[in-house]
Image (spheres, rainbow, N blue to C red):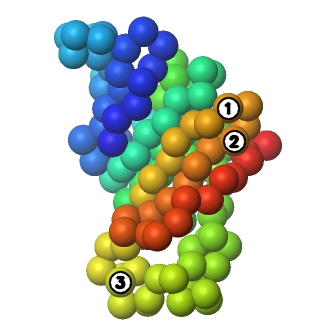
Amino acid sequence: GMSSYKNGIIATDGTNNIRFFDNNFKFLKNLAVKNNNNPLNYINDLSYDGNYIYANVYYSNNIYKIDDKSGEVVEVFDLKSLVDYELNEELLTYRNYRNGEVLNGISFINGKKFLITGKKWKYFYEVEFN
């Protein structure tokens, strides 16, 4: 995943690393993300709200709020209820969910609002993180 970040871009390669680039894609630094001193692997999509980086982890129902200086996870948001809604409303099948149509997209709107979606999901959901 990639996102704009201050005067540049952040990107992940699916590990626990977030890479920082300037607007010309010149590499600036690498940030190793940790949750409770353990690497947060499989980072998939990113969004930056002006203060923190928000990320999802592939096959996880969580969104992780990450300090952009230390790489530490400062808060975890459980979105299992959103996945359950998709399954219960038959917008998503268990088979497709097991085959990768999982929570996957996050995009900052403004304030504390984000758009959330999943791989091949039909809808976006507006979510507010407090």
Q: In terms of secondary structure, where does tag 1 sit?
A: strand
Within the image, what quadrant is residue 104 found in? bottom left
Q: Position of residue 124 (x, y in %)?
A: 55, 59
Q: Is mark 2 on a helix, strand or loop?
A: strand
Left or right of 83, for residue 11: left
Q: Which residue was labeled with disc 3?
A: 96
Q: In which quarter of the image is residue 10?
A: top left
Mark 3 element type:
helix
Q: How many labels does the image show?
A: 3
- The picture quadrant where one finds residue 99 is bottom left
Q: Earlier in the sequence, mark 2 or mark 3?
A: 3
In the rendered image, the quadrant that contains the N terminus is top left
Q: Mark 2 points at which residue?
A: 113
Q: Residues within 10 Å of mark 3 (few under 14, many from 20)?
A: few
Instruction: Name the mark nearer the viewer: 3 or 1.
Output: 1
Look at 57% across and 79% down and name the residue there.
86
Q: Residue at x 32, y 73 (%)?
A: 100
Would you name the residue on which mark 1 appears?
A: 110
Residue type at tag 3: Asn
Gap in angstroms between the C-alphas marked 1 and 2: 5 Å
Which quarter of the figure is the C terminus placed in? top right
The image shows residue 61, relative to residue 53, as above or below, that is: below
Could you tell me residue 19's position as x and y percent? Answer: 30, 26
Amino acid carrying mark 1 in the image: Asn
**Mark 2 and mark 3: Cα distance apart in space:** 27 Å
